[in-house]
């Protein structure tokens, strides 16, 4: 133990007593020569002394090179009680042009390195199988129209182990660019040499006609290479910076054709789809008819899809929702989709025709205008007319000065029907047991507690769709039979106006102001009698007490 301590002290003393060597050697070298145009190389400068990082001045390189990241490392070796220091700089360089370029000599504290003559050769002069890293790019078309989506694909080939890196998008002016999907990582064999391949796709949309210059995507990062130091027989993995760039591309962008008619949409394929019953269906007056139409376009941006507008007869009220737009990648192609859902409410019975829908688009392959179409649809509506929607807070009784017209005759007919109904009701009342009247009277106070609670909650939430459903459930339980909105609207004028306002608020894109508290009071204040409970077909004719 004592001998070990004495040896350690001796080594420390000898190290401290050793003279501080000044720099005596400065060497510069490159990791490749010749270098391919558009790729990078690593310049390594080694000094046999412990120096500050600022001792090496690389400003002389800026004339002929793009100077990238500079890294510095220091090491110290002790051999036979002789201590040696070393400072190493690694500078990432990218030549600005081809031919022979001279890397000038560097000088630190009176010691200089030798200059290096670097040969920058054309990319096509050296086979790609001799390269450890390179990039390839491709375009879906070399000619396009304004607003047309081009697909730009870039592949990074790596024969070295990648530590870290950044793949940058191509640079261009006068166009929009965005990445499509996620990167793909695979392996390929090129001329017998295995490469790791990282693939990325971009969508490019030109904003103006003319020539569009695309400066290729670029990569910069660190890779592991095998090196030998100080003439040793063993090799070590060393991290070195590297960068490369895809070649430049030029695309001709054509303007919109003069003969095109309609909102400009250029795509490889455009189709219209809709959700519609395959068999004829009869609808009731006041019931919403939902129509969902989807517009799909291949290799088009979602923002370029036009809005879908429906043309309907005056008796059909349309309430379109906000269009939904999205895009996705399918079979290596960008697909954009616009979905439009519209509620159609008939105010009068009859047979109506929804006109054909046509969306114009330009086919860049055929260079002609085409149309995506949906056929005309027929809607059959049964039942009576409903009142026009008005605000619920307006007074139901409004005095208007109009001509009599056919109203006196219609009023007389209703009066005769009312007298007939009254006679039938009195006759049925005589035969009805007293216990039934008591049961009905009791049911009016105890029935539909759950439905009433649901109705109150829906009105408190101020959601028209939920209020409509709760309203149907409330009256169905109250009357002991299924009720529709049309049946409920016949109970009173106030309910008819309230239902019309609810439908307008539920299916219109513009929110209608509704006083839900007053609406709840109208519903709960509606008085029902035995005739309304037992004879729904005569609800509109029964007298109210």
Image (spheres, grey):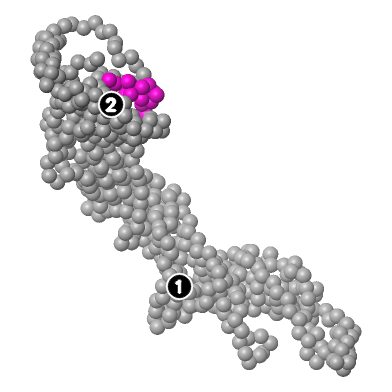
Q: Residue at x 43, y 50 (%)?
A: 176
Q: Report the disc number at residue 157.
A: 1
* The N terminus, quarter of image: bottom right
- The answer to whether 157 appears left or right of 415 in the picture is right
Q: CA distance from mark 2 to mark 1?
A: 85 Å
Mark toward the viewer: 2 or 1: 2
Picture quarter containing residue 195?
A: bottom left
- The answer to whether 11 appears left or right of 398 in the picture is right
Q: Up-down: is 298 above or below 513? A: below
Q: Up-down: is 182 above or below 509? A: below
| Disc 2 packing (10 Å; few <14; some 14–19; many ≥20) | few
Task: Estimate the x, y position of residue 295 in percent, counting from the top left.
Answer: 27, 46
| Bounds of the magenta segment | 509-527
* The C terminus, quarter of image: top left
Circle 2: element type: helix
Q: Up-down: is 218 above or below 504? A: below
Q: Up-down: is 55 above or below 405? A: below
**Residue 444 belongs to magenta span:** no
Q: Report the disc number at residue 475.
A: none
> Is residue 481 visible from the viewing direction of this image?
yes
| Residue at image mark 2 | 442
Task: Estimate the x, y position of residue 23 in percent, counting from the top left.
Answer: 80, 79
Q: Residue at x 63, y 92 (%)?
A: 233
Circle 1: element type: strand
In the depicted view, which residue is nearer to us: 218 or 40? 218
Q: Residue at x 65, y 73 (%)?
A: 90
Q: Residue at x 25, y 52 (%)?
A: 269
Task: Estimate the x, y position of residue 383 in percent, counting from the top left.
Answer: 14, 28
Task: State if disc 1 and disc 2 touch (CB < 8 Å).
Answer: no
In the depicted view, which residue is nearer to us: 229 or 480? 480
User: Reading the chain from its start, which is encountered first: label 2 or label 1?
Assistant: 1
């Amino acid at each position: 133990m004592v001998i070990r301590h004495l040896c350690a002290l001796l080594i420390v003393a000898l190290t401290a007593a050793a003279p501080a060597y000044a720099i005596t050697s400065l060497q510069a070298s490159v990791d490749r020569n010749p270098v391919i145009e558009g790729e990078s190389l690593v310049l390594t400068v080694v000094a046999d002394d412990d120096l500050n990082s600022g001792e090496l001045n690389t400003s002389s390189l800026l004339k002929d090179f793009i100077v990238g990241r500079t890294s510095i490392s220091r090491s110290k070796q002790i051999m036979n009680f002789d201590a040696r220091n070393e400072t190493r700089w690694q500078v990432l360089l990218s030549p600005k042009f081809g031919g022979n370029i001279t890397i000038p000599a560097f000088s630190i504290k009176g010691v200089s390195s030798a200059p290096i003559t670097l040969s920058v050769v054309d990319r096509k002069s050296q086979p790609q199988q001799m390269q450890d890293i390179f990039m390839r790019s491709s375009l879906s078309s070399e000619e396009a129209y304004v607003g047309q989506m081009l697909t730009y694909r870039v592949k990074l080939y790596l024969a070295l182990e990648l530590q870290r890196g950044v793949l940058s998008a191509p640079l261009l002016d006068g166009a929009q660019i965005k990445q499509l999907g996620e990167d793909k990582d695979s392996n390929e064999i090129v001329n017998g040499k295995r490469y790791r391949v990282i693939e990325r796709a971009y969508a490019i949309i030109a904003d103006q006609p003319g020539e569009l210059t695309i400066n290729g995507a670029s990569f910069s990062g660190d890779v592991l290479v095998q090196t030998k130091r100080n003439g040793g027989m063993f090799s070590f993995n060393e991290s070195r910076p590297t960068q490369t760039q895809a070649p430049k591309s030029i695309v001709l962008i054509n303007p919109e054709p003069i003969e095109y008619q309609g909102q400009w949409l250029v795509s490889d394929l455009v189709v219209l789809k809709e959700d519609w019953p395959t068999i004829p269906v009869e609808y009731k007056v006041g019931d919403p008819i939902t129509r969902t139409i989807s517009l799909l376009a291949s290799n088009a941006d979602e923002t370029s899809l036009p809005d879908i507008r429906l043309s309907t007869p005056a008796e059909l009220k349309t309430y379109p929702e906000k269009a939904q737009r999205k895009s996705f990648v399918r079979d290596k192609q960008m697909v954009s989709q616009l979905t439009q859902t519209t509620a159609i409410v008939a105010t009068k019975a009859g047979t109506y025709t929804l006109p054909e829908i046509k969306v114009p688009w330009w086919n860049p392959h055929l260079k002609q205008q085409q149309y995506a179409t949906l056929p005309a649809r027929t809607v059959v509506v049964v039942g009576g007319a409903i009142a026009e929607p008005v605000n619920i807070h307006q007074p139901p009784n409004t005095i208007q000065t109009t001509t009599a017209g056919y109203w006196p005759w219609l009023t007389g007919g209703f009066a005769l029907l009312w007298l007939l109904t009254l006679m039938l009701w009195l006759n049925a009342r005589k035969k009805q047991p007293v216990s039934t009247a008591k049961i009905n009277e009791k049911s009016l106070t105890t029935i539909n507690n759950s439905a009433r609670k649901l109705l109150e909650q829906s009105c408190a939430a101020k959601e028209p769709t939920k209020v409509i459903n709760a309203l149907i459930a409330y009256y169905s339980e109250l009357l002991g039979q299924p009720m529709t909105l049309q049946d409920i609207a016949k109970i009173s004028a106030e309910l008819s106006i309230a239902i019309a306002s609810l439908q307008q608020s539920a299916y219109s894109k513009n929110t209608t102001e509704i006083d839900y508290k007053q609406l709840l009071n109208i519903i709960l204040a509606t008085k029902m009698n035995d005739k309304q409970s037992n004879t729904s077909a005569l609800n509109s004719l029964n007298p109210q007490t």
